[in-house]
Amino acid sequence: PTAATTRPGRSSLASPSRKSPSARPARSERRRRRSSSSGIRTQRLAARRRTRFRPIASTTRAAARSAARSTSTWCLTRTTTPAGRSPSTNTLRAKSSTSSTRSSRRSRRTRTGSSFTSRRPSSRAGGSRRPTRSGRRRRGSSSGGSSSSSTAAGACTTRRVRSGRRWWTRRRAGTSSSSSTLAPRRRPRARGRSTRSGTATRRRGCSLQRRAWRASFGGGWTGRTARCGTSASRAPTVRRGSRSLGSSAQTFAGNLFGRGAGGYSSWFSFEGSGAQVNDDPALFDYNVDQWVDKFVQNAREQASHTQDAEHQIWALGSDFQYQNADQWYRNLDKLIHYVNLNGSVNAFYSTPSLYVDQKKRWNGTYELRTDDIFPLADDSHNYWSGYFTSRPALKRQVRFATGVLASARQLEVVTQTTAKEVDRPSAKHAPVVGSSWTDSFEGTVGVATHHDGMSGTERQDVTDDYAMRISSSQKEVEAGIGLAVSKLLKLERGAVSHCHCHAADDCLNISVCAATTGKDAFTIAAWNPLAHSVSEVARIPVSGGRWSVTDGVGRAVPSQVVPLDERTKGLPLLYLNSFGMSTRQVAEAKARLENKADHVLMVALESLPPVGLATFHAAADAESTVARAAPSPVDVAGEAAQAGQAAEAPAFAEAADTVVESDVFSLTFDGASGLLKSLTNKRSGATTALAISWGWYNSSVGGCTEYGPEVHPSARLPPCSDQQSGAYIFRPNSSTPFFPGPARKPAMRVSRGPLVTEVAQTFSPWASHVIRLFRNASFVEVEWTAGPIPVDTPWLPPVARHSDGRPMPNNWGKEVIVRYTSGLEAGHTWYTDSNGKEMVKRTYNRRGPTYPHDYNISEPVAGNYYPVNAMMALDDGTHELAVLTDISQAGASLKDGEVEFMVHRRVQADDSRGVQEPLNETMCGCNDIHAAPGKMGAHGREGDGGCECAGLTMRGRHLLLFDKVPAVRAARRALAEQLNFPPLLSFTDAKVAPFKPSSSLGAPLPPNVKLVTLTSNYADIHDGQLLLRLSHLYGAGEHPTLSQPATVDLSQVFSKEGLKISAARETTLGASRPLAGRNHVWRTHSRTEAAAREAEEIARGAFESRQPFAYPKVTLRPMEVRTFLATFA
């Protein structure tokens, strides 16, 4: 809801053509007031306050639309949209206390799932009223339901996700209506949301600018972040989120005042039966005067803590509220009505956009911020850096699904495969948004990006629902992909299969694939979704150790076969839930789950065409290449460890160093410790010490944090807190990680071959990795496998005992890390990506330039963890080490030259942030051990009848780049794209005719430009036009040449028959409207000298002038994203 302050008797901001309800009350209202002493008190109070002090704001409501008349407006703005009320309804409804009047004006609401639709009468006392739009289209959500709503009748343009905390618009790419559908003043230009989601505030500002949204308001910046990250007044700021785009990508942003401490809710709530506004003086609990007094007092309180206080925003909403829209709006209508009668402030429903319009007219300056708020903390020991890794399986599923979606969209356009041809629609609980067979998949992936979804801060049942919906809709997409590939290869329908982890026998990530196992021959169809030619090594599970591979025209392709390792063989067996099963049943279940493959075929997919298809034929062959396995000196200890036996600790035998090489890199492993010792780039001669180690932090269940000598006594806060580590919070009980199991020398096994050389290292049965050196590759791959993380720690002495002296298990939470320790002297500085885009400088125990210089660190580990979505890097000015990741993770550099990633978590306590259960995931998705339905089990989770299943096991990849700084920075962006958008592999055992690799593009894009989106899903609502989106991959100053603006001739790139462009017009990021003109220029100032220096530095290097689009050529500045609606022949 929203409101503005006005003098009594003036017209309304929301509707300047009609009288204000406060100008002349209805006759029944005047009669009631004359008979009520309380009503008289309200009138006298209003008159007295008008004469004793200047109102908080005094302006006409019509002045909001006329700058000449505007002096001030106080605004209570609804960023939350309780069920069914349109956020664009800026009206004030006069309300009588009589039951007849109340009855005649009652809203007509109908419940749909977890949401409401509302229609209000178009007439009311005091003037005509614009009706609220109805007929909104809805889509189911895992987190309490979601809907698609429109700001214009009949247009299904946005996705609104209901988290229990608030409603806000989650716009899906290309789903917005055309500009002719949406009136200019009805188009949203500002938004509200919580700030803890996995995107940095820097990138969020850039994204909003590209959507033509000019403002963003967040909640949850409480405690330390609110005190240190912004000024003490909690004033709104102007965030300049891009060092590349400078002032052309800045957003007006604010921390919602909320309950007075920076939260995202207001000071009042109408949930339940208490705290209602009673305006009937005949009842004993009449309380209008108290409500009005409290309202005005809180407005004055917020005014004393905010900048430009004459315009205020009150965002209503919190967890699990707004369940009863009728009750909320009855109370709000009363409250707004009587507050306006008082005259001190004028309250009205509004929107964030109108609030920002008033802020633009202010003559003062706002603080300019170029940094972000990470890591967020709501108190001294409560750092919200755990969710950067929480629920890694869902994070990976969303990441992988995004890559599949990109390929599916392209195949749909290139082959013109329709949903009718696919004929396998996913079950949908709401009308469709687009017309494509990718629409449902896009919807489920979009819903999972909700800030309580992919972040991992939801309950297990909700996580399971997200995963189920993505998997279910992906099956429809795979059917469409199979049909599209069949068209290209001229195969029969149903001849193409995939291995995308929808079942235990169908998952390439763990080397299980029914389409390739037990076969003598098969064909691989590889679709490259990138607009550049790429080379990749595919790993295909097969039966038998001798294979040969040829390409689509019969030429031999480099390949290699390696035996399937025991660790990988055992992964499918972890899906077994043995609760209530007999020994025979367990054996039978394991037999069904076991991997039928015994080898992995590695195939060099070389020079895949941009946005194109290539085929490779694999056949069993007695003369193919099999990798040689070289046993390591500690192989026996490794076998004992894999069998679950504890090896003798630290008396490691001396042994010679082991050197493993490719044509690009040389790795040296220390003979004494078994760890990697050094890394050398043979092409450039660069070398550094490098070790890869595993560890785990013990999750705190409350206690005192030990400060190391590096934390100055003056910067230390009180060390003790009862805060526990959980889904949101990462709080270790020590700054020193434990070894993953009994301390011992890690086992090592080396496999050498002409294409790939592998070094497998096992630190414990639940912590291992494989290092791979590929021929002619500029990176080192580290494939890590974490889990099942044990709950108990039997290798450590017990810390508690039963009354009879028996030891109690150490059921400790574990936060598992992989650490890379280099010899580079980086000055305690490193860089993390901002949501996969620009790199942000991080400094140990420091924050950005707008924070205090002597930043008090109360959690030396958690307080230095940041989100890593794509990569983390450090350099010494000459050489750089960059680590790329295929999944969002938490990362830090706690010592100079060192980076660590939290790859997995399994905690045994809840952190009291609303999840209400520990983060204790299992492989089979069941709940806790021996837990009855609805009851808590041994590990604190709700049961569904019992669970005896292994803990969640994760597998992912890190790519290590080491070279001179320009070389690493040139390669890391392209590799990140290849890692996250790999070739889409399809398999068939049908006979495939010779097929020459074919690209759908007339020419590849420049190496620093990415094809982000090409889809026909929304062609029906855009007059047959396709959504086309391009982006610049590099940031300003990142590379001498690749960071320069890039020009693309669309007529040359899209010139082939079937994908020939004929026209294009540029739009906002969501394709909701034509691209606007010049952005509003905010008047800003820097709060500190350091902030002023950084702002000047950014201004010198930024590309602030955007070049207009003149078809067919478009120029992209560094980090710029440009969106088009294009017509193709």
Image: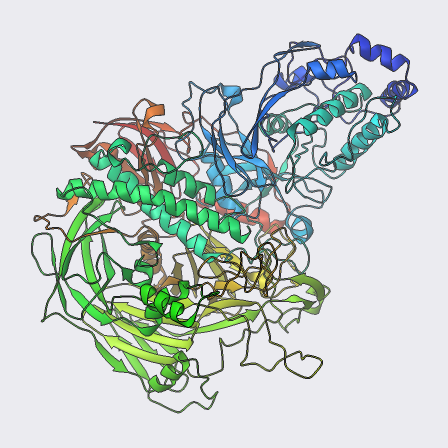
Q: Nearer the viewer, residue 551 or 1040?
A: 551
Residue farthest to the right? 37
Q: Left or right: 147 with respect to 52?
A: left
| Residue positioned 38% across, 61% down in the render | 956
Q: Is residue 486 above or below residue 639?
A: above
Could you tell me which quadrant the C terminus lies in? top left
| Residue positioned 42% across, 32% down in the render | 1070
- Residue 125 visible in the picture: yes
- Residue 242 visible in the picture: no
- Percent position of residue 781, x then y: 33, 65
Q: Left or right: 555 with respect to 209?
A: left
- Percent position of residue 383, x then y: 61, 57
Q: Nearer the viewer, residue 956 or 496?
A: 496
User: In the rendered image, which quarter is residue 346 located in?
Assistant: top right
Q: Nearer the viewer, residue 849 or 406?
A: 406
| Residue positioned 45% across, 20% down in the render | 154
Q: Left or right: 74 with respect to 955?
A: right
- Percent position of residue 695, x then y: 49, 72
Q: Is residue 822 above or below residue 357?
A: below
- Percent position of residue 1072, x then y: 42, 27
Could you tell me which quadrant the N terminus lies in? top right
